Image (spheres, helix red, strand yellow):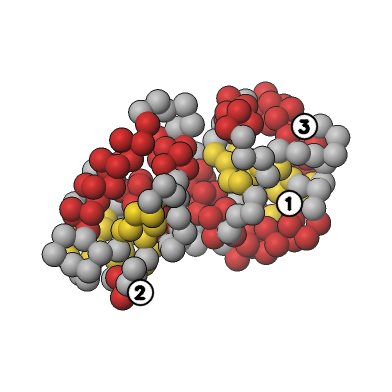
Amino acid sequence: MSGASGNNEDLIRVLIVDDEPGLVETLSVAVTEAGWRPYSAADGESALRTARGCAPHAVVLDGMLPDLDGVQVLRRLRYENPRLPVLMLTARDALEHRIEGLSAGADDYVTKPFSLEEVVLRLRGLLRRAGVEDARSDEFVLTVGDLVLMEKTREAHRDGTPIELTAKEFDLLWLLMSHPRQVLSKAQILDHVWSSSFDAGGNLVEAYISNLRRKIDKGRAPMIRTLRRMGYTIRPAEEGR
């Protein structure tokens, strides 16, 4: 492992590949604040060289690079390390581009513009699924109003009262609470909670939203809201409609 000190050598290494210096710097700060060690590369060839040198635990990879296409870089990274977690960044909203990246081996993706919290959250999930322990955080907790969700124990509480959730209900609620006050479409929910290729339509999302409302909002001020023809959002009950 590379590193300036013994402590640095113990840190989780995250390689950030993007040709926008400002974005790389911002992501590097977020990675450092998460307790990890950032490495960076501005193009595909240097990304491959850096990956061979630092042996990253995860990669944040832009889909559009000045030399190699992001998917080409992804395929080469996958060839050299089939289990390396890769989070794709894309400014392209077309479904076929997201499917191309996922088919090439990306574990997850976020679309620009994105929040740094979302990137860190998704990286943390990928690292844990890969079996890489994050020593700085034994438990990651989301809080919206009086609703609390705990990642490691997969427990939910509202105003101190436990709420029993199925695995997919938990995943859906985690997605909503990761984007408080933001409206998520049915397509976005299907992409993130199930998969881009999942063919169940919006009825599945409606059914799970209904289940969550019954468990979270019944007898209380509502938190989960529907915006007609737009999607769903969650916000503290005290903010009203």
Question: As shown in the figure, which amino acid type bears the numbered disc 2?
Answer: Glu
Determine whether, in the image, residue 25 is placed left or right of residue 126: right
At which x and y percent is residue 114? Answer: 60, 55
Q: Residue furthest right?
A: 67
Q: Secondary structure at mark 2?
A: helix
Disc 1 marks which residue? 39
Q: Is 96 on the left-hand or right-hand side of 237?
A: right
Q: Residue 157 appears at what percent x and percent y?
A: 24, 63
Q: Earlier in the sequence, mark 3 or mark 1?
A: 1
Q: Is residue 155 left or right of residue 69?
A: left
- Of tags 3 and 1, the one toward the viewer is 3
Q: Amino acid at mark 3?
A: Asp
The spot of residue 82 in percent (x, y) is 60, 27
Q: Which residue is mark 2?
A: 239
- How far is disc 3 from disc 2 in space, using C-alphas? 44 Å
Tell me: 214 left or right of 19: left
